[in-house]
């Protein structure tokens, strides 16, 4: 058992939390995606918000598996869903080294950008467009990517450019 899994098991999860620990194998991303979808349904997310949640969680977990834990199946990714009265907080925790910050790409992939090797960072851009708030931090648990999604969309929230 790796340290991340051990830490999740040592703590008693509050009643409003769902915690998961998966091997760093992309096949398990589907399990987390299904859990996110069911949690969103139970919280009353609209169909659009449910699709946003599912895709954002899928992207974050895939990034943690591929870039954080580098597909090392013996190293786990932790996922914590915290269900609050008006919003959901999702934390994705990997055991990788602290990553170099990538620019969040605000434009799509073109043939020219592929030829120049400028195709990374699109997943982060997508996540930022899908959730109400997202941030990266480093803790004793590892790299923590946290996303907030409100059950009811805020009036002032539109798909916005990333600063």
Image (tube, grey):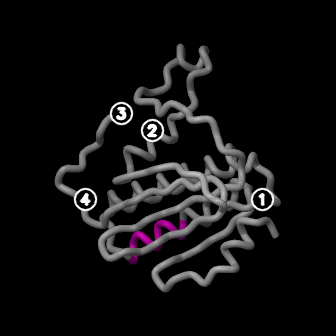
How would you rate the neighbour count of disc 4 (Cα within 10 Å): few for under 14, some for 14-19, many for 20 or more? some
| Real-space Cα separation, disc 1 to disc 2, in angstroms | 26 Å
| Real-space Cα separation, disc 4 to disc 3, in angstroms | 21 Å
Which of the pair 49/124 is nearer the observer? 124
Q: Which one is earlier in the sequence, the residue at label 3 or at label 1?
A: 1
Residue reaching furthest front? 140
| Real-space Cα separation, disc 3 to disc 1, in angstroms | 33 Å
Examine the residues drawn in magenta and state their main secondary structure.
helix
Query: Considering the image in quadrants, where does the C terminus appear?
Result: top left
Q: Nearer the viewer, mark 2 or mark 3?
A: 3
Magenta-highlighted residues: 34-42
Q: Is mark 1 on a helix, strand or loop?
A: loop
- For the residues bearing labels 1 and 2, Cβ distance under 8 angstroms: no
Q: Which one is earlier in the sequence, the residue at label 4 or at label 3?
A: 4
| Real-space Cα separation, disc 4 to disc 2, in angstroms | 19 Å
Q: Residue tagged by mark 2? A: 125
Seen in the image, is 44 located left or right of residue 112? left
Instruction: Indicate whether 6 appears above or below 107.
Output: below
Rendered image quadrant of residue 92? bottom right
Residue displayed at 45% across by 57% down = 147
Q: Residue tagged by mark 1? A: 75
Q: Where is residue 160 in the image (x, y as percent from the top left)?
A: 29, 39
Q: Residue tagged by mark 3? A: 163
Seen in the image, is 106 located left or right of residue 46? right
Q: Nearer the viewer, mark 3 or mark 1?
A: 3
Q: Which one is earlier in the sequence, the residue at label 4 or at label 1?
A: 1
Residue displayed at 57% across by 35% down = 101
Residue displayed at 50% across by 70% down = 81
Q: Where is residue 162 in the image (x, y as percent from the top left)?
A: 36, 36
Query: Considering the image in quadrants, where does the N terminus appear?
Result: bottom right
| Real-space Cα separation, disc 2 to disc 3, in angstroms | 11 Å
| Real-space Cα separation, disc 4 to disc 1, in angstroms | 36 Å
């Amino acid at each position: 058992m790796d340290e991340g899994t051990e830490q999740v098991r040592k703590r008693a999860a509050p009643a409003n939390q769902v915690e998961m620990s998966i091997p760093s194998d992309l096949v398990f991303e589907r399990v987390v995606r299904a859990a996110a979808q069911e949690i969103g349904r139970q919280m009353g997310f609209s169909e659009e918000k449910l699709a946003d949640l599912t895709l954002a969680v899928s992207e974050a977990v895939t990034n943690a598996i591929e870039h954080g834990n580098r597909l090392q199946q013996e190293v786990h990714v932790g996922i914590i869903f915290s269900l609050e009265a008006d919003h959901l907080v999702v934390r994705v925790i990997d055991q990788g080294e602290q990553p170099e910050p990538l620019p969040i790409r605000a434009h799509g992939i073109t043939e020219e950008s592929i030829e120049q090797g400028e195709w990374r960072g699109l997943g982060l851009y997508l996540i930022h467009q899908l959730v109400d708030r997202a941030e990266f931090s480093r803790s004793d648990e590892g790299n923590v990517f946290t996303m907030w999604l409100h059950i009811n969309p805020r009036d002032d929230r539109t798909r916005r450019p990333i600063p």
